[in-house]
Amino acid sequence: MSRIAYVNGRYVPHGSAQVHVEDRGYQFADAVYEVCEVFDGKIVDMTRHLDRLDRSLRELSIGWPVARPALERILREVVDRNRVTYGLVYLQVSRGVARRDFPFPPAGTKPALVVTSRAIPRTVAAKVADEGIRVITTPDIRWQRVDIKTTGLLAQVLAKENAKRHGGKEAWMYDADGNVTEGGSSNAWIVTADGVLVTRPAESGILKGITRAAVMDFAAREGLKVEERPFTIDEAKHAREAFVTSATGIVSPVVQIDDAILGNGHPGVLASDLRRRFHEGVELLPVRAY
Ligand code: PDD
């Protein structure tokens, strides 16, 4: 079956889907995006993702490309047309198409919208659950507005490529004080010896992950203690467990940080439990309205 993409009002074959050469997303990374997990034919936490999209757009004074209910329909339609049961749906909004010039384009320039969806083989998730992942640390060289989910991801491209070359699935970036900020495309967590979940506060240096919020909700329901505070790479290397959260990886246990093996080198009990039960409390929106 051929893949379908949504581009500025049309559903087109993925292979020939195109944006203009002067799309500001292409030229300036003047664009924001969201990624939602698709689980069992349902979009996970769409409301929270679209709330964050709204914030990203407002922070950058980009308008909604279509009304929110229309975007919700498009997301469901793209997942449905691509017959995705397990995978992701991606949306990107750029400031639109205009002659290349740094200041904002003339009023009336329409924001551009692209939506794609793809399946992720279940075997990929099973391997992460069974074996966990290795992360490679690297200095965080990003700009200061990492709270906005923009497509300006070059620092993460370099960090994750470096991680890959060193046998890692994810990069953990650290700030000038040696504290972990977050993963290249995930939030970073550790579990202390007494079972406390620790993650960096969302106020600085990270994107406020939707999966992170879902894990916090889960922890509150289960009576698990969460501490939002910075932690160093050294603390992480000696932690009882570590894991990362993201829409694409939900909860992925970390078993190795650089050359340091965590615990017995297998996914931690708490991280594995969080992963197994992750979908219990999240919003699950069926793609087809029956
Ligand atoms: N990335 N931090 C960064 C830098 C991210 O890029 C992401 C997500 C997260 C986790 O956020 P959430 O739980 O809302 O997915 C944290 C997506 C998955 C990506 O770029 O593919």
Image: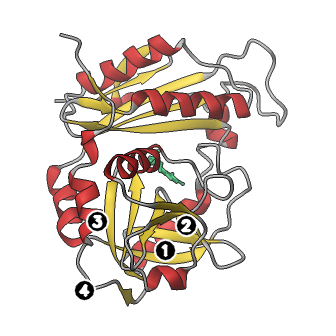
Q: Amino acid at mark 1?
A: Asn
Q: Amino acid at mark 4?
A: Asn
Residue at (39, 76) in percent of width and height = 194
Nearest the camera: 187 or 15? 187
Q: Amino acid at mark 3?
A: Leu
For marks 4 and 1 on the same chain, the one whose residue lies earlier in the sequence: 1
Q: Residue 163 occupies which quadrant of the picture?
A: bottom left
Q: Residues at badges 1 and 3 in contact (C-beta under 8 Å)?
A: no
Camera-side mark, 3 or 2: 3
Residue indicated by mark 1: 162
How far, Cα to Cα, is label 1 from label 2?
A: 6 Å
Q: Dot 2 surroundings within 10 Å: few (below 14), some, or many (20 or more)?
A: some
For marks 4 and 3 on the same chain, the one whose residue lies earlier in the sequence: 4
Residue at (65, 29) in percent of width and height = 57
Nearest the camera: 16 or 271? 271
Checking the image for residue 158, the label placed there is 2
Q: In the orientation shown, which residue stands out farthest toward the bottom? A: 259
Checking the image for residue 82, the label placed there is none
How far, Cα to Cα, is label 1 from label 3?
A: 28 Å
Q: Residues at badges 1 and 2 in contact (C-beta under 8 Å)?
A: yes
Q: Residues at badges 4 and 3 in contact (C-beta under 8 Å)?
A: no
Q: Is residue 209 left or right of residue 229?
A: left
Camera-side mark, 4 or 3: 3
For marks 2 and 4 on the same chain, the one whose residue lies earlier in the sequence: 2
Q: Is residue 110 left or right of residue 228?
A: right
Does label 2 point to a residue whose CB lies under 8 Å from ligand 1?
no
Residue indicated by mark 3: 270
How far, Cα to Cα, is label 3 from label 2?
A: 31 Å
Checking the image for residue 264, the label placed there is 4
